[in-house]
Amino acid sequence: MSSPATSVNVMLAVHEKKTNPVDLYRPLRLYISSTFSERDAQNADDDLAAVRQMRSDLENSSSSSPDSRRDLLISYSRALALIEPRFPISPDRGHVSSLAFTWYDAFKPSKKATQNSIHLERAAVLFNLGAVYSQIALAADRTAEKGLKQACNAFQSAAGSFAFLRENVAGKAAAGGATVDVSPESAAMLEKLMLAQAQECFFEKVIGDGKPPGLCSKVARQVGLYYEEAYAALNAAPLNQHFDKTWVSHVQLKAAQFYGEACYRCALELHEKEEIAEEIARLKIGISALADAKKTSKGVAAPLLDAVSRLEANMNRNLERAVKENDRVYLMRIPAASSLSALPGASLVKPTPMAEVLDASKERLFSGLIPDGSMKALSKYTEMVDDIIRTQAEKLQQGSEITRVKLKEMDLPDSILSLEGNFSMPLELKEDVEAVQISGGPVGLESELQQLRDLRRVNQELLVQTEELLQKEASEDTQFRTQFGTRWTRPQSSTLTKNLQDRLNRFAANLKQAADSDGRIERAVKDNYALMAILDHRPIESALPSLARPIMSLDGNEDAIVGALKQSLRQLEALGAQRAGLEDMLKEMKRKDDILPKLMAGTGSQDDLFKKEIKKYDQICEDIAHNIEAQEQLLLQIQAQNDEFAAIFNLEDYKVAREKSYKQIAAAIAKYREIKDNINEGLKFYVTLQDAINNVRQQCSDFVMTRNIQCREMIEEVQRQIAGFNFSSDGKSGYKYPSSSQPNPQRTASPQLDQQSPPLPSQHQPPYSHPTGEPRPAYSQPYPPYPAPQQPPYHVPGSQYQQQQRPPSHEYGQPAYPGWRGPYYNTPQQQPGQHPQPPYTIPGHYPPHQGGYYRPQ
């Protein structure tokens, strides 16, 4: 026993058992090589070495920290769980007979036990694990909240270790002659002692937190109850002659202390309620218990005696006060102790489940060592279990499918839901409606039509502005040609802008055709808006017909019929939930059904073992049969009830009206999608055409700028000719404009005007900019702009752009109409300068823009 002298509430920790050294490696390896093969023994060398090292560390772990000893004990316990089913350690022939474990009693170190059994080893390891947890708890600083919590958790883990020892190993170890400390009785006593100390940590917390006296009394009473159970075990065989008297006195005094604490706290609550008589009785009982316990408290730690004495003094002081108040004021009769009810307790602790902590299923030690006979027997048993699981699972699934089909045939529970106003519709149709509503619905089509109008207007304005650029330049050229006559030698504008003008004309034709398509779309929206308006209902179920009650009732039993049908449906739903639970239970039973350790033990007939183990599935198979039978009877009852329900509520007419609504909604969705696709096609067309017009406009602007530069130069030259200041190098007067094959030697950087020369890249901003009064539409473009064609500003015969240029791929997808291939898909071979046209005009679709995607000849 150990206890900190500085702690007010003295607690106990358990010392660990001691052992003699054991070499696990040689006996186990010899067994593997003789039972399995030398190769298996070689493969298991690392696992054997690991187990030997853990056992060696366990023998020399007294100097390590409690936390490291705890981890070592857990690892070694898992290893023993894997060794037990694979290595029969016993004196029997053919077993691991040369291996013996020796352990000394933790409470009487002079006594020891030696067994050729792994059960003693496992029992000792589990005992030491509980002891280490108790030491961790005792070392925690309970004056701090964190330390108090750590101590409480560690005491519960210690209780869990002793409980696991008691339930799984202690009996087997005791059968072989183990020491008393690992007996089931000792493990049970230590479990209660650890729970008492864990509950005592909670008592310290509620007192420190200033909780009400009533709660403190219940917590203290439970502490006392745990100590009383431990004290009773210490006074019973075989423990009554085994433990030191100081242990017995400590536990006895602790039980009395916390019974007194419970009486003291209960009396405080009674005093607040002015129940003075019972307060006096409780205080007297508590004081008497403390006095009796102190008489036999020899050898108890002084801090514990001091704590008991302080409690006794407080109770005597309160008793004296209560007696005076009762004598002077209340004059109540003091009840006898036997007439009082027992003080209630409130348990706030429980043993930590150690099965998960000690679970070795994820460990890989000796995973390759399974005897052939056990493996074949396990496969046979597994096949038997799988056959049961498969058969029963098929019954369950078949039952669920029958229910689904029958209810669908009877239109249940949809008809009941419709009667209550909870409409439903096919999931696919509902999802289609939601997609339409998310995209804006029919009411949002007007805004998209306005986008079409805005884009068409912008394209028309751009086209007009571009044409005005060319017209202005041609007008100026004609004016100078009239003014200077034959001296004005540069080519006429009309000969240079023919290709640009042709493209602008094609754009104008496309815009006209697109306007016609826009009109057809607007008419389609107007003509079909009444059909599509149903899609704007939110939720869409509000547009469905409802199942109405009959106008006239002969006997007024409609409610009773509906109620009976709903009750039957609820019962059917409960049967379905039960089937799901049964299926999960089957899977869980199969998952936990591990008989390998029993098979490897090799006791008894395997067939008898299989019959015994397979019987655990009988109950669930019977439950499944009852479920299927009950469902069959219930479906017959629901069929009869539904027939009566359908006759009274005219269900057939409702079904016809509902299907009609479904078809109307489907038709509205189809028409909406058709119009939406046409609008999207128009938007993509206008965006792409706007790109092409801007490209041509830039080319026209570059052309006009170049012509303006040429115009200034020619005006200066003509003026010099007229004034007689310019003479040519061959002696002839007058300036000759450069020919189509001769560049200007004085201005090599200036643009060439002849059609055989490439155009000059513009180094200046074009004189035209978009009018500030006519901004682009505010909405964003729905699709990426059509790629700008890579062509010179205007056609120059013989230039580097003479080669055939391929049109860019069409940016927007094909319309959703059969036979429509799109303006640039699957077109026949084109001649240069020609543009593919759709095979026919479809309302709502747009002409391909003639943006110069093929270079004219």
Image (cartoon, rainbow, N blue to C red):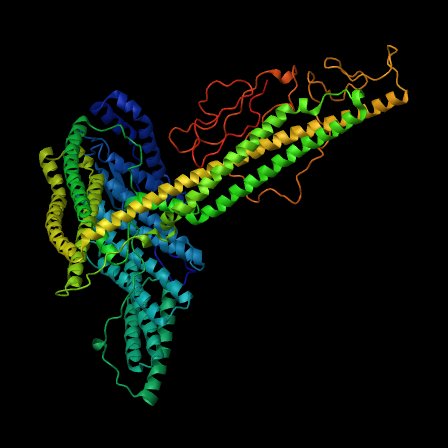
Q: Residue at the bottom extreme?
A: 328
Q: With respect to residue 380, does 141 lie above or below?
A: below
Q: Nearer the viewer, residue 94 or 698?
A: 698
Question: For this rendering, which residue is in front, 588 or 129?
Answer: 588
Q: Is residue 713 above or below residue 62?
A: above
The image position of residue 551, as x and y in percent, is 20, 63
Residue 211 in view (yes/no) = yes
Q: Nearer the viewer, residue 504 or 798?
A: 504
Q: Residue at x 52, y 43 (%)?
A: 451
The picture quadrant where one finds residue 749 is: top right
Q: Percent from the top left, x then y, of residue 204?
A: 39, 63
Q: Image quadrant for the C terminus? A: top right
* Residue 663 image position (x, y, % from top left): 29, 45
Q: Tell me which residue sits at (71%, 28%) in the image.
A: 474
Q: Is residue 788 above or below residue 626?
A: above
Residue sitting at 56 percent across and 31 percent down? 507
Locate residue 621 relative to residue 275 in the image: left or right: left
Q: In the picture, which quadrant includes the N terminus? A: bottom left
For the image, the number of numbered tags is 0
Residue 701 on image: x %, y %: 68, 30
